[in-house]
Amino acid sequence: MLSYQHGYHAGNPADIHKHLTLVTVSEYLLKKPAGIHFYDTHAGKGLYSLQDSQAQKRQEYLAGVQQLVQLRENLPADPWSFFFTQLDALHGGKVTPENLQYYPGSPHWVSALRRTQDQHTVFELHPGEHQQLAELHPNHTGYVVHGDGLSGVVNMLPPRLPRLQVLIDPAYEVASEYTDVASTVEAILKKCRHAVVMVWYPLLAAEKHHELCERLTHALDAPLLQSEWIYKEKPEGWGMYGSGMLVVNPPWVLQQQLTAALQPLAEQLGQPVEHRMLRYNAE
């Protein structure tokens, strides 16, 4: 959708959940020297000001990154140390609830992690968001593509590098995106069966994510880890009440790491994060 701009939601609890998963998975894969091609299908503009009109309209960051900063001393060092190193660098020193001004998008997190032997390709369809992303990350992201990330990533596979990681997180403003995402994941795994694919989805009253998860559970011959965090009461009508991550071919320690990392924040905002294996490795 060309109308969607993530600035209204930047730094909210769903962003924390998504980016923590992204960082944790990436750090695990980077322990091995073989190169990785990172793909990001819906990159946004890469860096968000929490003081601009978009962020201030909803102020969703107050329950997300601001709560995270307030709980800094109570969080486990791994993997939050990397999070705060990046936030501190963006703020020119130790970030506090009083001086918090910026929150990085997914391209920034991967750019800060990737090595010289890795590649990083990001897609963004919104022309304004794409322009800002291209200006912000000309030497860091690697390859910024103005176009549809779902079809784009499939068309670029298989990668030349031996390993592949993909983040898929559309806005889901159109119901067909759930089907499109499922089809994309299936196509990725057909071309690269060992790919690590992370799919973010919103928890909405309509519960459309069940169709996505059930389809991939039956379609893929790969382990699937589902992580869901309900951080506010479920509304009767429209509105997001939580965040979900579906990880294909997850690191074996991911469930334990996410639970330990998010527990202090989850206790402040709502129910604990729930993890379940939807499909175990056939081996």
Image: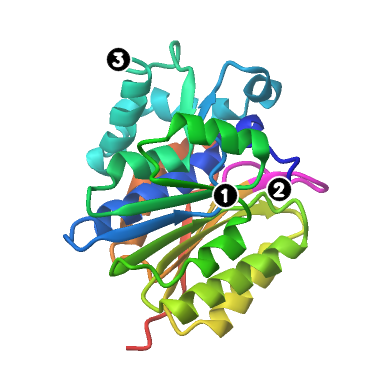
Report crowding for label 3: few under 14, some 14 to 19, many 20 or more residues within 10 A (C-alpha).
Answer: few
Q: Which of marks 3 and 2 precedes in the sequence?
A: 3
Do labels 1 and 2 touch, CB within 8 Å?
no
Decide whether the magenta segment is chiefly helix, strand or loop: loop
Inter-mark Cα distance, 2 to 3 = 37 Å
Residue 59's disc is none
Number of marks drawn: 3
Extreme-top residue of the structure: 98
| Residue receiving disc 1 | 42
Inter-mark Cα distance, 1 to 2 = 26 Å
Q: As displayed, is residue 130 above or below residue 148? A: above
Q: Secondary structure at mark 1?
A: loop
| Residue receiving disc 3 | 93
- Compared across the picture, whether 233 is left or right of 146 comes to right
Is 159 contained in the magenta span? no
Residue range in magenta is 230-241
| Residue receiving disc 2 | 234
Determine the image quadrant of residue 112: top left
